[in-house]
Structure formats: structure tokens, C-alpha cells
Image (cartoon, rainbow, N blue to C red):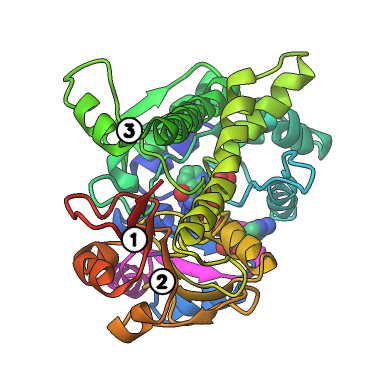
């Protein structure tokens, strides 16, 4: 398999990427921009046809990046996995959601490996980038490959390399974030490291796939626990009539030993609400209870309900009932400046408010209209629309709202601010969480 190293060094290796979403598309384009031939496959034909037209659907990827790599023929999108027949490397970037029972669902990974097994028998480096529980690469992927008669090191190399991209982050894109790689053997690790060094200046080699899998889960567990802590403090400060936001800002002036995390209406996105539960699920197999994860998840899951409770109380103080109240939701996305509503707390809040009989109006600058399954009327935040509402509930601190926050406060009758974007504005209309 050492021939692969030579091919990578000469940029002759053909790279396949399975799953062209928030993770797979930017990654594929980084390799394509460096001159590798990259074949991307996605089962979603709409996405593939959009890419073939040179149109990106991922906020951090510009159309020009797609167009230029298509033109140079270094990037080729397909909806059929057989396009990967001539690849030397295949990188798997498919979703890893939770089942309804809140257990890991690795079926997309299994499907991706099945499609690799259906390709021409060729010696390949296979890399998993999807976030998953420690052991997946070895216990699921290596096992499937070996069950099909393939021999490690002879027929395949196998590595886990966590994707650490933060969609919407202007300072750190895929190419700027150090890459961790851990293979099933030292040769796999070495060759994968050589591959990533072409697009990412810093590559960290760890001793096993399990360590690499755990790195990602430690990072996201660190976040879920700290967000859980600060959400609990926000609820505590509210009872004590202390502005938690002011406290965090002041604490963050300490130049060491403190890193600010901020409260909010609840967790969202494909990572933080999900990944740590992959870890706690696996820990249970070792008769180990991941108490920090469970407690933090529990507190974070309470936040949408907490926001609703604050809304009901604020309406009540103004002699209004939640039933029939006109509530204007600003922001659907789970975080600022992204076009992504996966697991967004806005969805839980909208659904609960609908159940309570409120009339829901919605706006998000990243959505021109409402998806059919979200119950609410789409309206732009014009002064007249803001004035016609009983309550504005700001869920996402998109820049577009920050820019017009003074007007929003001026025209609304009440604003529940879950993100402190009203910082510096004094008004009895504002209710902070
Ligand atoms: N989005 C993030 O911020 C982020 C950051 C780091 C890591 N991750 C992890 O990366 C993985 C992918 O996340 P994402 O946000 O890119 O998901 P995504 O839903 O944006 O993209 C995944 C893509 O895979 C495609 N797909 C599914 N099964 C396929 C198959 N068998 N063959 C071909 N295509 C297939 C889907 O159509 C989809 O377009 C997940 O494990 C996630 O946890 C995500």
C-alpha cells in the first residue's frame, strides 16, 4: 500500500467524498483547489444538480469555488457511487443522527461502506469523518470490510479523522483547523496524515481510531457541559434578579482560566445536541454512566420550555394570555448567520406555542419562506408587522437583527431577547432570559 503515499505526494491520487453536505463539500473543494482529482457523491440529486450548475448550497462555500474547480475538472459531483470506481481514497462524510430512542444511528455509515464494497476491487485508503462513538471505525467499518474478505494493510487502509468545522465561522474554515488522524495501524495513520497535509498545515497523529473518535467527543462534550452550566446559571441569576450576561462579560475579562459560554433558548445543529449522546450510549456498554453529559443534556433540553415560561409570564404581566397572543419569532436557525434549522430550539418553541393556542408569525433572513411542516405565517419585520404583535421572541442573533435592533425595540410592544442582542439598549419592553 506504500504506492498510495507516492500517488498522494504527486497529487495523482483520486479522492472520493461520500456525502456533500456542510462537511463533505468544503472538504472536497479544498482537495480540488490543491489540484487533486476529487469525485463527490451525494444521494440527494437536487444537491448534485445544483453543484453541476456551479451553485453552492453551503453558506461557507462560494459559487465561484464550485465553478472554478468544475472548470478545471478537479471537482466532479455525482449521485451514483459507481463514479468512485477509480478512486484511491474515499472519505465518508455522511450524517450520524440519533434514533427516536436517542441511540446512535450509524445506518448512513453502513450504507456508505456498502457502496464502497460495491466498487471495483482496488486498494484504497478509507477515512471516516462523520462524528461517532469510539469503536465505530474498528467495530463497524473494519469488520464490514474484513467480513467481505478484504485484508487490512493489504487491501485497505482505514482511518478516523474528526471533522471540526464550525459552519458560519469567518475566522476558521476547513483548511484552518488542525486535523487529527488515527488509523487502525501506523501505516494508515501515516498515509492519511500525508494526504491531509496537502490542505491543512497542522496534522496531529494519534495512536488509534478510538482516540481520534474520542477527541471529537471530548470537544463537543466540553461544549455541551459548559453550555449546560451557563444555562443553569442563567435560570439561577433570573431568580436572584442578576443580569447573567453582564456577569459573563465581566468574568471573561480574566485573562486566564475562564472561557465564556453564553445561555440561549436551547441547543441546535447536527453536533452539540447529538454527539455527546453517542458517547454516553457507548459508555453504558462499559457499565459507566456519563453523568456530566446526561445532566447537561437535561438542562439544555429544558431551555425551550424555560423560554416559553418566560414568554407566558411576560404576557401575563401585560394582562395578556398566551392563548390567541400574536407571537413573532425572529430567527429559526439554531445559531447566528447560518442557513441550518436542524435540531433548532425554534422548532420546539413554535410547536409548543402553537399547542398553547398562540398565533405564530415567523421570520428568518436565511429563509425566504416557511417550510410546510413549520406552523406559522412568514412575515418580514417591518415596523407595521412588529407593531401588530403582542410579543417578539428573538431566538437567533443573526447579524441582520443586530443591525436593526433599535428599530425592533422601538416598534414592538415587548421583546423576549434570548441572546442579549439588546445589550446597551434600555427599555422596559425588553425581557432577557
Ligand atoms: N455540520 C457540522 O457543523 C459538522 C461539524 C463537524 C462534524 N460534523 C459531522 O459530519 C457528519 C456530516 O454532517 P453534515 O453536517 O455534513 O451533514 P449533511 O446532512 O449536511 O450532509 C450529509 C450528506 O450526506 C448525504 N448522504 C447520506 N447518505 C449518503 C450515502 N450513503 N451516499 C452518499 N451521500 C449520502 C446526504 O444526502 C447529505 O447531503 C456528521 O457525522 C456530523 O456530525 C458536522
On the picture, is 44 further left or further right than 344? right
Write the residue at 62% across / 70% down: 323
Residue 220 falls inside the magenta stretch: no
Q: Of the residues under marks 1 and 3, which one precedes in the sequence?
A: 3
The residue labelled by disc 1 is 337
Real-space Cα separation, disc 1 to disc 3, in angstroms: 29 Å
Image spot of residue 430 (x, y percent): 32, 56
The residue labelled by disc 2 is 364
Closest to the observer, 259 or 60: 259
Residue 87 falls inside the magenta stretch: yes
Write the residue at 58% across / 21% down: 292
Q: Of the residues under marks 2 and 3, which one precedes in the sequence?
A: 3
Q: Of the residues under marks 1 and 2, which one precedes in the sequence?
A: 1
Image spot of residue 254 (x, y percent): 18, 20
Q: On residue 242, which mark appears?
A: 3
The answer to whether residue 158 of the structure is visible from this angle is: no
Amino acid at each position: 500500500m506504500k504506492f498510495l503515499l507516492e500517488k498522494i505526494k504527486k497529487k495523482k491520487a483520486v479522492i472520493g467524498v461520500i456525502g456533500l453536505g456542510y462537511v463533505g463539500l468544503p472538504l472536497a473543494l479544498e482537495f480540488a483547489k490543491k489540484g487533486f482529482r476529487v469525485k463527490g457523491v451525494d444521494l440527494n440529486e437536487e444537491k448534485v444538480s445544483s453543484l453541476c450548475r456551479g451553485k453552492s448550497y453551503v453558506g461557507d462555500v462560494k459559487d465561484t469555488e464550485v465553478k472554478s474547480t468544475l472548470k478545471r475538472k478537479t471537482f466532479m459531483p455525482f449521485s451514483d457511487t459507481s463514479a468512485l470506481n477509480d478512486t484511491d481514497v474515499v472519505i465518508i462524510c455522511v450524517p450520524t443522527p440519533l434514533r427516536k430512542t436517542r441511540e446512535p444511528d450509524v445506518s448512513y455509515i453502513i450504507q456508505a461502506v456498502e457502496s464502497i464494497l460495491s466498487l471495483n476491487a482496488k486498494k484504497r485508503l478509507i477515512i471516516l469523518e462523520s462524528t461517532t462513538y469510539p469503536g465505530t471505525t474498528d467495530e463497524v467499518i473494519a469488520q464490514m470490510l474484513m467480513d467481505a474478505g478484504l485484508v487490512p494493510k493489504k487491501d485497505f487502509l482505514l482511518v478516523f479523522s474528526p471533522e471540526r468545522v464550525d459552519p458560519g465561522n469567518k475566522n476558521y474554515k476547513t483548511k484552518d483547523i488542525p486535523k487529527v488522524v488515527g488509523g487502525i495501524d501506523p501505516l494508515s495513520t501515516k498515509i492519511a496524515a500525508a494526504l491531509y497535509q496537502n490542505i491543512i498545515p497542522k496534522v496531529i497523529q494519534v495512536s488509534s481510531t478510538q482516540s481520534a473518535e474520542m477527541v471529537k467527543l471530548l470537544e463537543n462534550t466540553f461544549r455541551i457541559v459548559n453550555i449546560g452550566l451557563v444555562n443553569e446559571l442563567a435560570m439561577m441569576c433570573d431568580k436572584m434578579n442578576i443580569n447573567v450576561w453582564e456577569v459573563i462579560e465581566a468574568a471573561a475579562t480574566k485573562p486566564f482560566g475562564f472561557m465564556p459560554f453564553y445561555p440561549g433558548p436551547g441547543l441546535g445543529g447536527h453536533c452539540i445536541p447529538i454527539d455527546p449522546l453517542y458517547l454516553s450510549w457507548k459508555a453504558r456498554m462499559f457499565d459507566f454512566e456519563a453523568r456530566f453529559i446526561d445532566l447537561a443534556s437535561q438542562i439544555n433540553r429544558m431551555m425551550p420550555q424555560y423560554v416559553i415560561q418566560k414568554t407566558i409570564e411576560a404576557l401575563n404581566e401585560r394582562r395578556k394570555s398566551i392563548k390567541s397572543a400574536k407571537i413573532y419569532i425572529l430567527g429559526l436557525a439554531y445559531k447566528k448567520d447560518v442557513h441550518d434549522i436542524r435540531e433548532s430550539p425554534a422548532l420546539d418553541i413554535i410547536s409548543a406555542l402553537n399547542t398553547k393556542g398562540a398565533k405564530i408569525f415567523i421570520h428568518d433572513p436565511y429563509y425566504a419562506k416557511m417550510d410546510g411542516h413549520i406552523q406559522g405565517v412568514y412575515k418580514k419585520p417591518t415596523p407595521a408587522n412588529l407593531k401588530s404583535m403582542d410579543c417578539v421572541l428573538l431566538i437567533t442573533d443573526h447579524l441582520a437583527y443586530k443591525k436593526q435592533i433599535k428599530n425592533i425595540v422601538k416598534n414592538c410592544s415587548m421583546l423576549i431577547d434570548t441572546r442579549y442582542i439588546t445589550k446597551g439598549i434600555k427599555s422596559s419592553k425588553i425581557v432577557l432570559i
